[in-house]
Amino acid sequence: MTDRNDDLFSAAREVIPGGVNSPVRAYGSVGGTPRFLSSASGATVTDAAGTTYIDLVASWGPALLGHAHPEVVAAVQEAATRGLSFGAPTEGEVELAALIADRVRFGEIRPIERVRLVSTGTEATMTAIRLARGATGRDLLVKFAGHYHGHSDGLLAEAGSGVATLALPGSAGVPAPIAAQTLVIGYNDPEALAAVFAEHGPRIAAVIVEASAANMGVVAPLPGFNSLIAATAHAHGALMIIDEVLTGFRVHPAGYWGLQAAAGENYLPDIFTFGKVVGGGMPLAALGGRADIMDLLAPLGPVYQAGTLSGNPLSVAAGLATLRLATPEVYATIDAASDRLSASLDAALTDAGVIHSVAKAGNLFNASFRASAPRDYAEAQAQETFRYAPFFHSLREQGVALPPSVFEAWFLTAAHGDDELQRIEAALPAAAAAAASAHA
C-alpha cells in the first residue's frame, strides 16, 4: 500500500526530471521516497501523508527563527497586499541593503559599503566572479575541491553538496574552455594555495571560498587559513570572494567572518555573497563589498548584472523581518542547542561502537563516518557513507527529519526547544544501532 508521498513522487516523475526540482531532494544517496512537505511550523514539518517530523533541515538553512515565524509571515502578507512584484526600486530594498552592511562589522571594521540584491545564491556567486574579473582584468578563478558555489558554469568542478552525493566530477553541458578558467585546489592546504599563485598569479582574478565549508559535510577552515587566502590573493593583485550563502547570518550576527573576527582572526574579503537566511525563506540573495569594487556594477560601471525579480518586495519583507528578529539571544539559543545535540550525537554513535567524528563550525554540525573530522574533500569522501542511509531512515521513522545526504550540515532553529531536543536525543540510540549494523 502506498501513501500520498509515493503517489506524488510517481506523478512528479512523469512531469519533472527525476521527480524533483533540486537533485538532493530525490533521496538518491539514502533511498526511499522523498517526503513531499505540505506545511511547517516552528521546529516541525508535515508531509503530504500527514506525518509530522522534528526538522533538522530548516529549508537548508533559511529558517533561522523556525518555520512560518508569525512576524515574518505577517510581514510577507502585508507586503503582498501592496503588490507581488514591481520591477522598480522600493524603499524596503534600501533598508535591507543598509541592514546587511550594518550587521557585517567588527568594532569599527565594516567591509561592506555597497550591496546588490539578487534572487539566488547561484546568481550572487556568479555575479561576484564576473565582478572580480571586471575589477582585475583577469580571467582565472581559484576554488577549493568540495566547495559548492552554485551551479553556474565553471563552478561545478569538484563541487560538494548534491554533486558530491551524486558522485559527479562536474557537469555535462559546461564547455571545456569555460571549465579551464577555474583552478581547483585542496582545501586547508597552504602549500597548494602558494603553488597555484606561484604558477598562475598574474592571471588569477579571485579566490572563492566558502567561509566554512558546509557542502561536503561541515569542514571548518583551519586556524588562519581564511586569513592566508586573503593575504595571498592581495599580494598577487587578486581578490578574495567569501561565500556566506549558507553561513551568513546563521552562525553569528555578522556571519562566519564575524565569528572569526570575534575570535581574533582578522582578514578583509573583497566581496561577500549571502543567501538563505538573508531572505528569510523567500528567494533572495545578495553580494556586497567595498564601494570601489561594487560600483563597477551597472549602471555605474561596465560589469553588467540585472534581474526582473531582484529585490522582490515579498522577499525583501521576509529578509528584513528575519534579520531584525535575529537577535544575540536567538544565536545564543541556537548555539546552546547545537552544543547539546552534537554532544548527544557523538555519545550515541560512541555507545553503538560506530567509527565517527562530529564536526562543527559555529552552530553547524554533522556526523562523518570516519575516525577524525575531515579537513578537505578527499577526507570527507573517505568515510563509510553506507552507514548514513540506515541512520537517516531510523530517525525518519522515529519522527526526525535529517538532510538526505551525509554531505550536508544539520540545521537547528530558535524554535528547537527542550522538548524537541529530548525527542531527537531519544531517537539517536536506535539510529546509531542501525548505522552500526550496516554493511557496504
Image: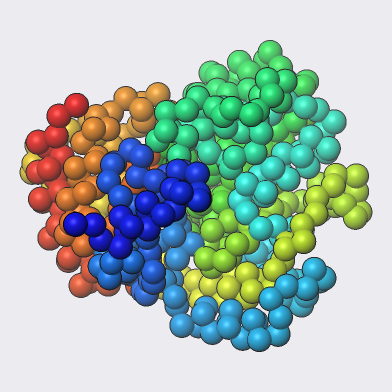
> Which residue is at the front of the view, 362 or 267?
362
Q: Is residue 429 visible?
A: yes
> Which residue is at the front of the view, 117 or 398?
398
List x then y, in percent, for residue 277: 53, 62
Q: Is residue 222 visible?
A: no
Indicate left or right for 244 with 402 as reference. right
Q: Which quadrant does the C terminus fall into? A: top left
List x then y, in percent, for residue 265: 53, 44
Q: Which quadrant does the N terminus fall into? A: bottom left
List x then y, in percent, for residue 385: 27, 32
As displayed, is residue 313 above or below residue 199?
Answer: below
Describe the colour scheme in one phrase: rainbow
Q: Looking at the image, which residue is at 68% across and 13% down?
A: 199
As displayed, is residue 275 above or below residue 160?
Answer: below
As displayed, is residue 375 above or below residue 97?
Answer: above
List x then y, in percent, for residue 248: 54, 55
Q: Looking at the image, which residue is at 58% across and 56% down?
A: 275
Q: Looking at the image, which residue is at 15% across and 40% down?
A: 435
Indicate left or right for 9 with 74 as reference. left
Q: How many marks?
A: 0
Indicate left or right for 81 with 12 as reference. right
Q: Looking at the image, which residue is at 44% across and 53% down?
A: 12
